[in-house]
Image: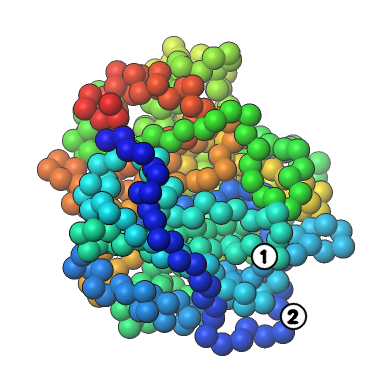
Amino acid sequence: MVASQENLVYGIKLSSVGPGRITGSDVVHDPSGMDLAMKLHYLRGVYFFSSQAAQGLTIVRIKEATFTWLNVHYRTCGRFRRSESGRPYLKCNDCGVRFLEAQCDKTIEEWLEMDLSHQKLLASNQVIGPELFFSPLVLFQVTHFRCGGISLGLSWAHVLGDAFAASDFINGLGQIMSALEPNRLPNYTTSNTKFQKLENPPPPLSIKQVNPVGDHWITPNNCKMETLSFPITATQLNNLQFKILGQNQIDQMPIFELISAIIWQCVAKVREGSEPKLVTICKNDPKERTGGECSNSQIISTVKADFSITDADPKKLATLLVKQAGNERSQIEEAMENDNGVADFVVYGANLTFVNWEDADFYGLEVKGHKPVCVHYNIQGVGDEGAVLLLPGPKDFGEGRGEGRVVNIILPEKEVFGLKSELRKNDLLLENELE
């Protein structure tokens, strides 16, 4: 359903929430090179709760829990400054997170039937800058729907941490609201992973330097980007595995690489000019997340094909993604440190980028026994080459949809129409979706 965005969300009230106790004087945090490489990207999450669940999610209750949770997550309340060399650092000065309240005359069911572009109304699209010392890193937005349900929007500066860190942050807030002890506290006492210094390392292929953006941290795009989102049911997944892999090899290829291979080929068929033979892969690194680290610790790797993408067997592409991905995190760190963290880079969309969020606990936000009926996550600030995000689907996706997935694709606007046709030909997009 297409609807005008005018007045869909209104009555916005603005406030700030800080920690319940003073963090201390002159507390600063020096972001790692990997953190600074992500500073032009932002995560936007929206959690939808039914009217029954919303009874335990009053504004007062959310703010009270936030006061408590920010005592340990004090970095999210800081503001950026620059050192004399120009390198950004975070001053943990308890300035707080921004809090928005809004109203909507739609029901949640009506809202979820509308075009995806409206989701940006439920989570703030504010970016850092142009005045660093006034710019919050985290913003919450609570929107009240006509049915009594609410949405909780999270705007998260990627320089703080990746989607897995953001998910841990908001899930811990839910545990505080439920009067439970959070099972993952942020680990601010240990330094970020130190990478071995390489001798004459090759430049990382997964990042692209852009013209200086100064103190206004936003990705410069040369074209208008558009997002399309659709579910993939468990039945669809089984059919795709059988079609591409055959009966005897269904369990031998990860779902992420299989879907990425199909979409890679679909994008290659609609993209003008040369094929996207170099792609970036972003995945969770569970080894780096054992102690509650709040950082950018995902694996970032690249894969390059030396053959035609459009003519390739999707199985060959998927196998390439599994076997040829090489981790470039140490090279990214090295590249950032060579410029003392001052240069500006794009990661998502530097190449066509595939992001695996299957393991992200987006449905782990639980309040008084109630989980969200739907969760939507996206990335703001994707570069011109585009990005594909694979998210977990809700457990009650509907008949045949248990353990399904949700795909978000951010591409140049001119490519989206043709891509929909290719996705339908490959049985990823059903005929009645995204009409």
> Callout 2, which amino acid?
Asp
Residue 164 visible (yes or no): no
Q: What residue is disc 1 on?
A: 134
Query: Label 1's element?
Result: helix
x%, y% of residue 13?
45, 66
Q: Which mark is residue 324?
A: none
Residue bearing the label numbered 2: 26
Q: Secondary structure at mark 2?
A: loop
Q: Is residue 180 left or right of residue 289?
A: left
Left or right side of 338 for 356 = left
Residue 107, image x, y percentages: 23, 53
Residue drawn at (59%, 36%) of the image: 383
Q: Quadrant of residue 426?
A: top left
Q: Amino acid at mark 1?
A: Phe
Q: Residue at x 51, y 75 (%)?
A: 17
Is disc 1 in contact with disc 2, using a CB cutoff of under 8 Å?
A: no
- Rendered position, 260 above or below 375: above
